[in-house]
Amino acid sequence: VNAFMSDLLGFKQKIDEGAVPKANFKAIRPLLAKEYFNVETMRNKSNAAAGLCDFVLNITKYWDVNEEVEPKRQAAAAAATQLAEAISAKDDALAKKEEAERVVAAQTEQYAAAVRDKEEAAAEAEVCASKLGLAKRLMAALGSE
């Protein structure tokens, strides 16, 4: 009796694990459809029969709900996996973006420094050209004397 009760109590877990064939619940449907297969009628016969009838009715309802919910549960698990992959891909993309922004900032700074150097060199070249022009005029003026 204890082993039988343990089997009954563990039946829900067997359903959850997928260890109960669908054919079992298909085969029991004609019995469930009988008008005498209900707890009240069975209670008139015996309390044990009523308990077993109640168990069969409830575990069948559980099976039906589980069959309806299981695809949704699997879809939710797949969606959670897909979400985790998408988050990981997003994090990788953000890390690459940040690295690219650092590279762009460094190159922008290098470019700005090069532009400053060029402008300073151009200004110095202009000053030198101006001095050269003045020196040539001075040389020409001194050479003509």
Image: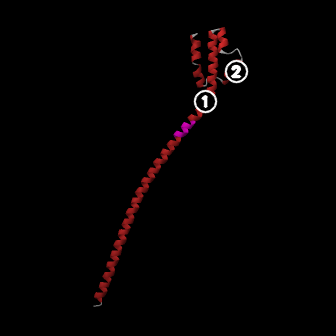
Residue depicted at x 62% and y 20%:
59
Residue 138: x %, y % from top left = 29, 84
Magenta run includes residue 68: no
Vertical placement of 114 versus 138: above or below? above
> In terms of image quadrants, where is residue 126?
bottom left
Residue 75: x %, y % from top left = 59, 35
Vertical placement of 130 versus 120: above or below? below
**Residue type marked 2:** Arg
> In terms of image quadrants, where is residue 104?
bottom left
Q: In the rendered image, which residue does mark 2 sit on?
A: 29
Nearest to the observer: residue 106 or residue 10 = 10
Vertical placement of 139 versus 120: above or below? below
Which mark identifies residue 70? 1
Residue 47: x %, y % from top left = 62, 9
Q: Which residues are magenta?
A: 78-84
Q: Quadrant of the N terminus?
A: top right
Residue depicted at x 50% and y 45%:
90
Q: Main secondary structure of the magenta part?
A: helix
